Amino acid sequence: MTNTNERAEKGHWWILTALILGVIVGLVVNKTGGSESWAASFQFIGDLFLRLLKMVIVPLIFSSIVVGIAGLGKIEGFGRLGAKTFGYYALTSFFSIVVGLAVVNLVKPGLTNGQPDPEILAIIQNQSAEKLAAAEMKMESATTVGLGVVPDLLQRMIPPNILAAASNNSAMLALIFVALMTAFALAGMTGAPRDHLLGFFEGLNTLTLIITKWIMKTAPIGVFGLIAAIVAKTGLDIFGKLAAYFFTVVAALGIHLFIILPLVLYLVARVKPWRHFSAMRPALLTAFSTASSSATLPVSMRCIQENAGVSKRVTSFTVPLGATVNMDGTALYECVAVLFVAQVLGQGMDFAGQFMVVVLALMTSIGVAGVPSASLVAIIIILNNTGIEGAAGAIAAILAVDRPLDMARTAVNIFSDSCGAVVIANSEGEELEPLRS
Ligand code: ASP
């Protein structure tokens, strides 16, 4: 094993220790009172770490894409790469939704003896007026979002102002689009202008990778802050209230993460899945702690290139795009959440209704941003479009247990993106030595 891998291994243990410590300290604070002020201090530490990660996203993504594509000087085969990548996204998202659908229909977390669970119903009906009003407002504004997924994507992709897009972390799709255009144009240029520009982007890329490495050294402190803040604020009591729902989501995510995706890795990419898990550990832990695919992006790009051995060309194309549009965990979650709400409100769905949920979950997961709790809007859109009524209380209740589930689904989102990079790299004939040995 290389030195880099050894260091990554150690980094991963520190992050894991910090995570466990965060849970313990958070619990102690939660039980002994005064959690508000402690939580605020922990949150402050966690926020600083998040800021550091977000700080490098724009230069890292832009320079990686330009160098990864223009650096090789050949852009043939790019259509093929794109088609394969989108094929992977669509298929794995579909698999994940089917897993969610199967598990929620099997467990039926919203029902007891075939009837809406009275305890859960009571929780939903007893939401405070304040929370209900907030959920209702969200529902009303979401109805107008509509389902123009493709036009919406196209609009988000083409920025009216390049500089504004480059200074906006949430305009990721636009950034990728401009970086791809820059890379294609640069690949067609010759002589000094090309060399100067390419040299600049290569320098910028190396520079941001060095800074990312530094930032990752602070990850244990940041992760501790993020986790301790959440646990100090909420404790573990929330699990009790909607336990069946909680464990249904976790079981379905677990099946996708530990069975379906490893099978894809093994059967399609012919690599050892456990090696890939180990390569991706720092990214998985960061995704889990931050609940944000976007913030995890710098870490996943590093893990995929340095630990899994995927080329810069494939990484820089598939991973930023994946973090923005490929969300297996989110798609699965949307499906389980909507069917759970339907069950508990006694508005069970027939096959046609469930099929509609599958299609809508597939489409809306593409548009969900890689930030915490982003799927909530998608869930509301699906509820509105499938005609489920009186769901505001359920939305408020789901929101109360959302954070830990968000952490889990974000880790699945990130892992699926990384598997996509491996599958595409394998199909392009790359060695992927660390994952095969
Ligand atoms: N937090 C998720 C992510 O960043 C999105 C979501 O499902 O809310 O990937």
Image (spheres, helix red, strand yellow):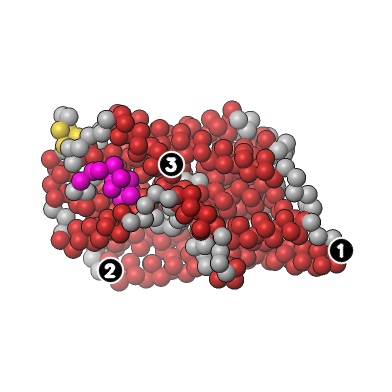
Q: Residue 131 location, x and y as percent?
A: 21, 60
Residue ID for mark 3: 362
Instruction: Please tell me whether residue 361 is drawn above or below residue 70 in the rendered image.
Output: above
- Where does label 2 land, which residue? 36
Where in the figure is residue 335, as x and y percent of width and height?
35, 40
Q: Residue at x 67, y 35 (%)?
A: 427
Which label is found at residue 419?
A: none
The foreground one among 90 and 277 is 90
Element under disc 3: helix
Residue 385, magenta (yes or no): yes
Query: Can you tell which quarter of the image residue 186 is in?
Result: bottom right
Instruction: Look at discs 2 and 3 and give the one toward the viewer.
Output: 3
Q: Position of residue 430 (x, y in %)?
A: 72, 39
Q: Is residue 125 visible?
A: yes
Q: Position of residue 218 (x, y in %)?
A: 53, 64
- Going from N to C along the chain, the mark reached first, 2 or 3, is 2
Q: Is mark 3 within 8 Å of ligand 1?
A: no
Tell me the residue that label 1 is attached to: 191
N-terminal of the two: label 1 or label 3? 1
Compute the Cα span from label 2 to label 1. 60 Å
* Secondary structure character of the magenta stretch overall: helix
Distance between mark 2 and mark 3 Cα atoms: 38 Å
Looking at mark 1, is its residue's CB closer than 8 Å to ligand 1?
no
Task: Tell me which residue sits at (17%, 29%) in the image.
Answer: 114
Ligand 1 contact, mark 2 (Cβ < 8 Å): no
Q: In the image, what residue type sits under mark 3?
A: Leu
Placement of the N terminus among the 4 image quadrants: top right
| Residue 401 located within the stretch drawn in magenta | no
Label 2 SS? helix
The magenta segment is 379-389
Q: Is residue 101 visible?
A: no
Q: Of label 2 and label 1, which has the lower sequence position? A: 2
